[in-house]
């Protein structure tokens, strides 16, 4: 039997424009999503995601991650965990967060960190996945929402949405079409999680 629906209390981590966070806000405001965004954190001081959070009166904060570029140092990681806990977060949503999540954060939120990746995993993990797909000559791109584990873009897959690669696609046109699908996929994955309809069974995520 499904677990009863609960209100997810999410913390969003992002480094960029925050359009995925915007899609989650839209779904909440349209009463399509049983989720509260408790706090937004960014490793980029002037990231648009922080601006967007302010526009929606969501608490937000910059996390100083110096000196590393690709991961959180121990202090930044502890700060993140502490702030997320202070805001009563039970689920961490990575939305364009450009740093590797380390064991400290993973252990603080076991099986409760999810990510969106702009490719059909396991193809094209890592950065600029849509560029990788176009350069490779793939015919199909897309996006993947997955649970986060210790690897880079390797955790159990929740939802995928395909996007055909067109002959005249550029990096920009392809990424724009992938983002349209991301903005459907992320709210949908959160809806299933909030409804208690996701069960991790080894590598598989069963949708109940
Ligand atoms: C998205 O394409 C996401 O898949 C990737 O980074 C981008 C973030 O976009 N991980 P936004 O900041 O949500 O607009």
Image (cartoon, helix red, strand yellow):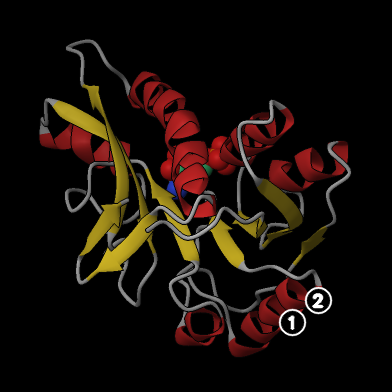
Mark number, residue 91: none
**Depicted 167 relative to depicted 10: above or below:** above
Which residue is painted at 66% across and 54% down in the image?
Answer: 7
Asked if labels 1 and 2 touch by Cβ distance under 8 angstroms, the answer is yes
Residue 61 locus on image (x, y percent): 80, 61
Residue 171 locus on image (x, y percent): 34, 27
Residue bearing the label numbered 2: 86
Residue 145 horizontal side relative to residue 183, left or right: left
Q: Residue 128 lies in what quarter of the image?
A: top left
**Depicted 90 relative to depicted 177: above or below:** below
> Mark 1: few, some, or many residues within 10 Å (few <14, many ≥20)?
some
Q: Residue 153 lies in what quarter of the image?
A: bottom left
Q: Which structural element holds mark 1?
A: helix
Residue 45 locus on image (x, y percent): 76, 57
Residue 23 horizontal side relative to residue 155, left or right: right
Q: Which structural element holds mark 2?
A: helix
Considering depth in this image, is 95 or 36 the residue closer to the camera?
A: 36
In the picture, which quadrant includes the N terminus?
bottom left
Residue 159 locus on image (x, y percent): 32, 43
Whether residue 155 is visible: no
Residue bearing the label numbered 1: 82
Q: Is mark 2 within 8 Å of ligand 1?
A: no
Which residue is painted at 20% across and 21% down in the image?
Answer: 165
Residue 83 horizontal side relative to residue 107, left or right: right
Which residue is painted at 70% across and 44% down in the image?
Answer: 49
Comparing labels 2 and 1, the label whose residue is closer to the camera: 2
Considering depth in this image, is 64 or 148 the residue closer to the camera?
A: 148
Which residue is painted at 47% across and 81% down in the image?
Answer: 102
């Amino acid at each position: 039997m499904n677990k009863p629906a609960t209100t997810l209390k999410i913390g969003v981590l992002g480094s960029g424009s925050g359009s995925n966070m915007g899609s989650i806000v839209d779904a909440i405001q349209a009463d399509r999503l049983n989720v509260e965004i408790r706090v937004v954190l960014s490793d980029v001081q002037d990231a648009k995601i922080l601006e967007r959070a302010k526009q929606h009166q969501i608490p937000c904060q910059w996390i100083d991650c110096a000196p590393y570029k690709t991961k959180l140092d121990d202090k930044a990681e502890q700060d993140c965990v502490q702030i997320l806990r202070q805001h009563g977060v039970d689920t961490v949503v990575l939305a364009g967060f450009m740093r590797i999540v380390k064991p400290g954060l993973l252990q603080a939120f076991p099986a409760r960190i999810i990510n969106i990746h702009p490719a059909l995993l396991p193809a094209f993990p890592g950065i600029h996945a849509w560029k990788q797909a176009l350069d490779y000559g793939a015919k199909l791109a897309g996006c993947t929402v997955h649970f986060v584990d210790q690897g880079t873009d390797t955790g159990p897959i929740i939802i995928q949405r395909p996007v055909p690669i067109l002959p005249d696609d550029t990096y920009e046109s392809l990424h724009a079409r992938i983002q349209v699908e991301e903005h459907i996929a992320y709210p949908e994955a959160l809806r299933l999680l909030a409804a208690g309809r996701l069960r991790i069974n080894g590598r598989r995520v069963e949708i109940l």
